[in-house]
Amino acid sequence: MNQPLNLIDHRDINQQLDLYHINPNSPGMVLWHPNGCYIFERLQQWLRLQLMQAGYWEVRSPIQLPIRYFDFSPLSRNEPSGALHGILHLRAFHQFDVRYHGEQQE
């Protein structure tokens, strides 16, 4: 892989490293293989650490104010099959969400 980064296609990397597959019956839904799952989980761990060091706590719903929260939620959307592109444009994915809930200044 001695190509400039902007010329590297993630689908080629997937072929070389066996990261995931997309079932033709469920286009846009990534099914992670062990190598891909490992990378995905390490990225989540790294991002969790960064967010916690910035003062955020991982939760599912806010409780008390002021506080900073983050979570990794699985999301899905019904994208037309022609809009799907490897893992760049999907129907199901995980997205982290960061929220700051503070008391209103008087």
Image (cartoon, rainbow, N blue to C red):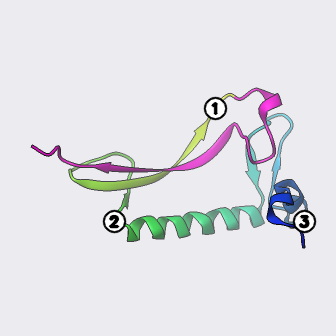
Is residue 65 shown in magenta? Answer: no
61 or 103: nearer the eye?
103
Q: Which residue is mark 3?
A: 16
First reached walking from the N terminus: tag 2 or tag 3: 3
Q: Look at mark 2 in the image and give the residue it sits on.
A: 55
Quarter of the image where one finds residue 7: bottom right
Q: In front: 12, or 22? A: 12
Q: Residues within 10 Å of mark 3 (few under 14, many from 20)?
A: few
Which quarter shows the C terminus?
A: top left
The x, y position of residue 97, in whole percent, is: 46, 49
Q: Residue at x 78, y 32 (%)?
A: 83
Q: Is residue 85 magenta?
A: yes
Left or right: where 73 falls relative to 38: left
* Residue 1 screen position, x and y as percent: 90, 71
Residue 78 horizontal side relative to residue 50, left or right: right
Looking at the image, is mark 2 or mark 3 nearer the viewer? Answer: 2
Q: Which residues are magenta?
A: 79-106
Numbered disc 3: secondary structure? helix
Mark 2 burial class by Cα count in 10 Å: few <14, some 14-19, many 20+: few
Image side of residue 95 versus residue 86, left or right: left
60 relative to 91, above or below: below
Could you tell me how far apart the alpha carbons at marks 1 and 2 are, in whole angstroms?
A: 31 Å
Q: Name the kind of residue labelled 3 in the image.
A: Gln
Q: Which residue is mark 1?
A: 77
| Residue found 80% across the figure and 64% down from its top | 5
Q: Separation of disc 1 and disc 3 at Cα?
A: 29 Å
- The residue located at (30%, 47%) in the rendering is 62
